[in-house]
Amino acid sequence: MRAALAIGFATLLGCADEPLEFVCESDKQCEQSDEGLCVRQWCSYPDEGCDSGYRYTADADPDVAETCVPQADLPPA
C-alpha cells in the first residue's frame, strides 16, 4: 500500500513542471479584461504591440502562448 502511494505521489510531482493550458469556449471565460476574446479556444487580450491588437495569454496552447493573434483569426468587427 505504501509503495503504491509513493508511486502515485512521485507521478504527481513529475507532472508539476508541465504548463497548464486553459481552453475557453466563450469570451465570458476570458475574465481578465472586459475586452478579452476567446480565439481558437484560447483567451487573448488587447495588446497594442500586435497588428491584430490582441495577444494570446501564457496559458494558451504552447504553440501560440504569448504570441500575437493573427488578424484572420479574430471575429469580424
Image: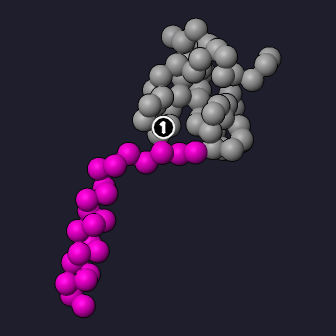
Residue 45, picture quadrant: top right
Horizontally, is 74 left or right of 47 in the view? right
Q: Is residue 11 above or below residue 60?
A: below
Kindly identify which residue carries mark 1: 61
Q: Residue 2, position in %: x, y?
A: 21, 87
Q: Residue furthest bottom?
A: 1
Start and end of the magenta stretch?
1-23
Residue 31, picture quadrant: top right
Asked which secondary structure carries label 1, the reply is loop
Identify the residue at image location x=29%, y=50%: 17
Residue 40, picture quadrant: top right
Q: Residue 12, position in %: x, y?
A: 31, 65
Residue 5: tell me if it is visible.
Answer: yes
Q: Quadrant of the N terminus?
A: bottom left
Is 3 contained in the magenta span?
yes
Q: How is the image coloured?
A: one colour
Is 12 contained in the magenta span?
yes
